[in-house]
Amino acid sequence: MTSIPDISLNNGQTIPQFGFGVFQIQPKDTVAAVSTALKAGYRHIDTAEMYRNEAEVGEAVAKSGLDRGEVFVTSKLKNDAHEPDEARQAFEETLKALGTDYVDLFLIHWPLPTRYGGDFVQTWRTLEEFYREGRARSIGVSNFQPHHLRRLHGETDIIPAVNQIEVYPYFTQDEVRDFCAEHQIAIEGWSPLGQGTVLGDPVIRSIAERAGKTPAQVVLRWHIQRGDIVFPKSVTPDRIKENIDIFDFELSAADVEDITLLNKNERLGFDPDKFAGM
Ligand code: NAD
């Protein structure tokens, strides 16, 4: 069985550095995809209320025969439930859909600085309740910029355990990563393959040929060696297995650097300072 490293979070909990993302997997395909992933050795699933497939994630985990404690499950607060009472209700619905009495990690999905009077601080305080109750073993944020994190730091009690942000070779996010490293906030890189857009890059292809690995494996390995937590998505069984098969080789420091130098500050997703939810 592939050995996936654990990352220690700032609250003493650990998280598998590699997992499976289920964004854009249709509910009807989710049980099969997550089951394939769990059979292939994945032990960390990243879902969200807005992905509408939490129930199917829970079903696949329950059917796997693994103990609940063997699988790290993350979900995220939907954008239209940032008010404390709505957030409490949404969190209840997450637990019910997943069929579990706790999540390993619960995140504010987007800071939404132009909605709710920009008050993501009160939303964070509501997540702190879930953490104190033990119903979220860790809490964190997603798509937060250093200035959002500074506000949480100044006005709340608990430092986010993670910040889940877009990271891939054309968008290396060095500023946010450096800030989070300084404040013991682990980075989770979303869209780690750039949704497939970097796989034809000549630099990545040539490193892959030399390593005897695929471009996807090289890019995922690059993330792992930079220390980020990643969870690529696929519904194709061969790709699900290919993506986890990255723990038997290493990139040289020069290869890691060459991939990092591909950065073009090219965001695929929304700008967190402007995004107002959908
Ligand atoms: P990704 O970078 O994981 O790319 C997925 C796509 O890459 C697949 O649809 C497929 O087309 C291709 N692919 C996957 N494996 C491949 C392989 N081995 N060879 C060739 N092509 C391959 O993109 P993603 O799904 O957007 O991101 C991964 C996860 O990150 C999501 O599922 C979700 O859990 C999370 N995410 C979070 C946010 C957020 O705002 N917090 C936003 C987007 C994604």
Image (spheres, rainbow, N blue to C red):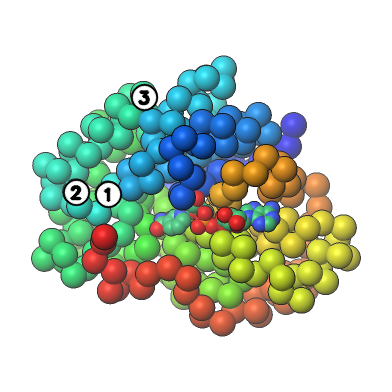
Q: Find ligand 1 in the image and state its quadrant.
A: bottom right
Q: Secondary structure at mark 1?
A: loop
Inter-mark Cα distance, 3 to 2: 21 Å
At label 2, the amino acid type is: Ala
- Check residue 78 in the rendering and tell me which mark sits there, or answer none: 1
At label 1, the amino acid type is: Lys
Q: Secondary structure at mark 3?
A: loop
Observer-nearest of 215 and 70: 215
Residue identified by numbered label 3: 100
Residue 214 at x, y percent in the picture: 78, 58
Residue contact between numbered discs 2 and 1, judged by CB atoms under 8 Å: yes
Mark 3 vs 1, N-terminal side: 1
At label 3, the amino acid type is: Thr
The answer to which image quadrant residue 146 occupies is bottom left
Observer-nearest of 177 and 159: 177
Residue at 19% from the left image edge and 48% from the top image edge: 81
The answer to which image quadrant residue 206 occupies is bottom right
Inter-mark Cα distance, 2 to 1: 6 Å
Horizontal arrangement in the rendering, residue 100 relative to residue 8 (left or right): left
Q: Secondary structure at mark 2?
A: loop
Residue 74 at x, y percent in the picture: 42, 41
Residue identified by numbered label 2: 81
Horizontal arrangement in the rendering, residue 274 relative to residue 17 (left or right): left
Horizontal arrangement in the rendering, residue 10 relative to residue 252 (left or right): left
Residue at 25% from the left image edge and 33% from the top image edge: 93
Residue 155 at x, y percent in the picture: 19, 60
